């Protein structure tokens, strides 16, 4: 195994633009154009130790966070210390991330023979075996549910952490609430998986303690988001959209607190199961 080194991140691309101005006509046949800001996206090709692994459509911001979070959330590395170097290159609609990882992680990756040609909506594209879609992950330690006041008006309170959504919409957000109930960090992306990967990557890079914390996603909560939060060690996941049945079942089996906040109803606790039965 290679000796662990300090993570080095380099980039030779210009600062990415998250939104750009376009024009639209207010109605068919009208000639008056109106300006509007639209969310940008780019294709990011990711290679590990020189071997191409995935091409993901992402928002062109916080790409280093995304690469770290994608690597952790997909199980390619088990810890950020196994990532030695990230180099981001390219500009415009095409970017390249060259990632150097530890030998042990690279051999594990090659054995999996996985290719993930990703997109903004599906997190399981290219998975070749059922055990990759339903991995064997350890049961999490039992953690208390967050206090009710942490979730009060949460939809409104996260607005300041969603600048791109405020400007042009068309993006998902993932946020982290620390063990004191404070919103510490937020990331946005056109892809709901990507937003969560960026959040997990940022938390790992800043060595944020996630014990007792809460991950919040503004998107639909499906199984792969559960996996990412579980691998990150975050004990609670809050979703603004209802989870799938399989996501709720997995959370219950693995002691992940899973809470849905509907638009106009009180929070719904799907996991732990006994808490749900008491409400």
Image: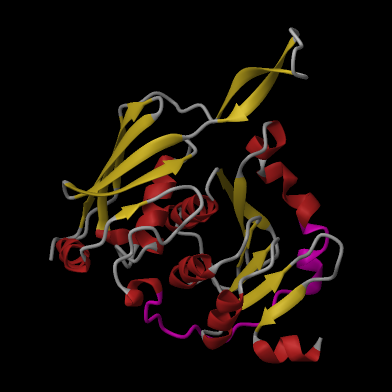
Q: Position of residue 105 (x, y in %)?
A: 21, 64
Nearer-the-camera pick, 113 or 92:
113
Furthest residue toward top: 31
Using the rendered image of the protein, determine whether residue 74 is visible from the camera's viewpoint.
yes
Total marks placed: 0
**160 relative to 74 in the view: left or right:** right
Q: Look at the image and name its color scheme.
A: secondary structure
Using the rendered image of the protein, determine whether residue 177 is visible from the camera's viewpoint.
no
What residue span does the magenta drawing correspond to? 134-154
- Say whether residue 202 is magenta: no
Q: Position of residue 124 (x, y in %)?
A: 41, 62
For the N terminus, which image quadrant?
bottom left
Furthest residue toward right: 264
Please tell me whether residue 17 is drawn above or below residue 67 in the rendered image: above
Residue drawn at the location 84% of the way across and 70% of the way down? 266
Q: Residue 133's image quarter?
A: bottom left
Residue drawn at the location 43% of the way across and 42% of the way down? 57
């Amino acid at each position: 195994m290679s000796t662990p080194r300090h993570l080095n991140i380099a980039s030779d691309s210009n600062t990415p633009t998250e939104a750009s101005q376009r024009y639209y006509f207010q109605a068919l046949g009208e000639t008056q154009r109106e300006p509007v800001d639209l969310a940008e996206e780019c294709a990011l090709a990711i290679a590990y130790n020189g071997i191409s692994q995935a091409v993901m459509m992402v928002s062109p911001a916080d790409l280093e966070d995304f690469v770290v979070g994608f690597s952790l959330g997909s199980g390619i590395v088990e810890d950020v210390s196994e990532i030695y170097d990230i180099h981001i290159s390219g500009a415009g609609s095409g970017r390249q991330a060259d990632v150097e990882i530890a030998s042990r992680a690279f051999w594990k990756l090659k054995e999996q023979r996985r290719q993930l040609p990703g997109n903004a909506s599906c997190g399981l594209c290219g998975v070749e075996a059922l055990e990759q879609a339903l991995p064997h992950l350890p049961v999490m330690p039992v953690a208390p549910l967050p206090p009710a006041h942490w979730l009060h008006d949460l939809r409104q309170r996260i607005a300041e952490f969603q600048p791109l959504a405020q400007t042009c919409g068309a993006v998902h957000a993932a946020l982290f609430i620390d063990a004191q109930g404070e919103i510490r960090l937020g990331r946005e992306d056109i892809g709901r998986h990507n937003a969560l990967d960026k959040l997990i990557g940022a938390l790992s890079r800043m060595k944020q303690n996630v014990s007792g914390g809460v991950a919040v996603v503004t998107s639909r909560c499906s199984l792969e988001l559960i996996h990412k939060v579980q691998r990150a060690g975050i004990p609670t996941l809050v979703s603004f959209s209802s989870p799938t049945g399989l996501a709720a079942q997995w959370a219950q089996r693995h002691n992940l607190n899973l809470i849905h906040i509907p638009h106009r109803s009180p929070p719904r606790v799907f996991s732990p199961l006994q808490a749900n039965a008491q409400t």
